[in-house]
Image (spheres, grey):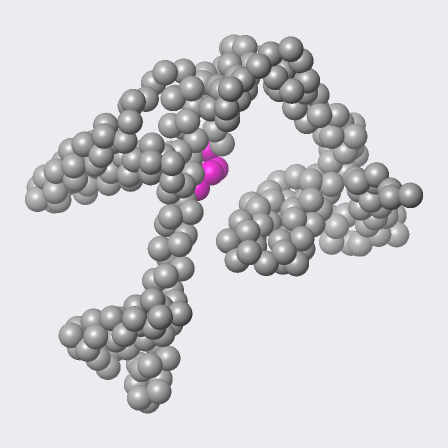
């Protein structure tokens, strides 16, 4: 008989209890919610990296590391008398049922957009004393936060009808950025750069794209081409500093050609 999925979570909970026990690991026993904060962020980013690489074994490992952080923090809050891992699981289960009345109740939705709008409407009723944007973590990466803020604002009708609005805004912000640069007003320049990045993120969202994924992909391409140029220079017994600008441009184009061929 096949065991029910999720039963092995109890093993991880017990292992964590042992690690934090009197004969457990000295390092684990010294940790607090505050010291673990960085690891939650790091492990979440490593999960994203594993997804982007498309490697199932790596993804399984990184999801395990992230799950460990959940269990670890729940063990610490249990010690404080706040809640334990069962409280965490119960809370999310209750939320999922409560916010999916079209699955667990009598309501109906036509598509994914209707489901998102329904979820946000229920959430707004539950958190009516909080602002529509209050649920977006300040610690999110900037582009991702821009998208989430845009989504929250859109859910209450504060949004452009299509991508044309943010596209025009990009031109407007570029003009203001140039004006600030011409005045050499660094405070205004930073301000306009932020507005431009927000407009770009909004344009991506309206086109159905993930700006955070787009910038990661762009950085990966740059890093790959840059490393190709470094290796080419090493083959010649040089470093990139030994080449002039036209030579560097030529090396870069060769790197792009290799990338396209691959």
Q: Based on the displayed image, in which of its 4 quarters is residue 196 positioned?
A: top left
Where does the N terminus fall, quadrant-wise?
Answer: top right
**Which is nearer the eye, 6 or 248?**
6
The location of residue 158, given as percent across then percent down, is 34, 18
Instruction: Answer with left or right where residue 146 lies relative to residue 74.
Output: left
Evaluate whether residue 120 shows in this view.
Answer: no
Q: Nearer the viewer, residue 3 or 87?
A: 3
- Whether residue 116 sits left or right of residue 161 in the image: it is right
The residue lying furthest to the bottom in this view is 237
Q: Residue at x 41, y 27 (%)?
A: 151
What main secondary structure does the magenta stretch of the protein show?
loop
Q: Nearer the viewer, residue 3 or 43?
A: 3
Compared to 215, does 114 lie above or below? above
**Rendered location of residue 118, percent (x, y):** 52, 17
Q: Is residue 250 magenta?
A: no
Image position of 217 (left or right of 79):
left
- Residue depicted at 46% across the width and 33% down the height: 138
Which residue is nearer to you in this view: 79 or 223? 223
Vertical comparison of 11 with 25: above or below: above
| Residue at (71, 25) in percent of width and height | 93
Instruction: Give the x, y percent position of residue 114.
Output: 49, 20
Q: Is residue 96 left or right of residue 42?
A: right
For the C terminus, the image quarter is bottom left
Residue furthest toward the front? 110
Taking the image as drawn, is residue 25 in sight?
yes
**Which residue in the rendered view is the most extreme toward the right?**
1
Which of the 4 image quarters holds residue 220? bottom left
Q: Which stretch appears magenta?
A: 138-142
Residue 140 on the magenta segment: yes
Residue at (78% x, 54% y) in the render: 26
Residue 77 position within the rendered picture, expressed as x and y whole percent measured from the top left: 73, 33
């Amino acid at each position: 008989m096949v065991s029910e999925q999720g039963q092995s979570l109890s093993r991880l909970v017990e292992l964590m209890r042992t690690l934090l026990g009197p004969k457990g690991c000295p390092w684990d026993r010294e940790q607090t919610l505050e010291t673990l904060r960085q690891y939650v962020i790091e492990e979440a980013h490593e999960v994203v990296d594993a997804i982007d690489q498309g490697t199932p074994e790596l993804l399984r490992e990184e999801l395990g590391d992230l799950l460990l952080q959940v269990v670890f923090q729940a063990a610490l809050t249990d010690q404080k008398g706040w809640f334990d891992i069962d409280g965490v699981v119960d809370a999310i289960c209750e939320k999922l049922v409560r916010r999916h009345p079209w699955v667990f109740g009598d309501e109906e939705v036509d598509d994914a957009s209707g489901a998102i709008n329904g979820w946000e409407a229920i959430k707004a009723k539950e958190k009516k004393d909080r602002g529509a944007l209050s649920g977006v973590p300040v610690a999110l990466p900037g582009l991702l936060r821009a998208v989430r803020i845009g989504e929250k604002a859109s859910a209450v009708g504060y949004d452009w009808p299509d991508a044309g609005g943010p596209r025009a805004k990009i031109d407007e912000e570029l003009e203001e950025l140039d004006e600030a640069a011409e005045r050499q007003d660094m405070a205004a320049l930073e301000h306009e750069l932020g507005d431009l990045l927000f407009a770009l993120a909004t344009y991506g969202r309206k086109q159905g794209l993930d700006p955070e994924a787009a910038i990661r992909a762009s950085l990966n391409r740059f890093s790959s081409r840059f490393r190709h140029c470094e290796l080419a220079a090493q083959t010649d017994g040089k470093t990139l500093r030994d080449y002039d600008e036209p030579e560097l441009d030529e090396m870069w184009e060769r790197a792009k050609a290799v990338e396209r061929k691959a």
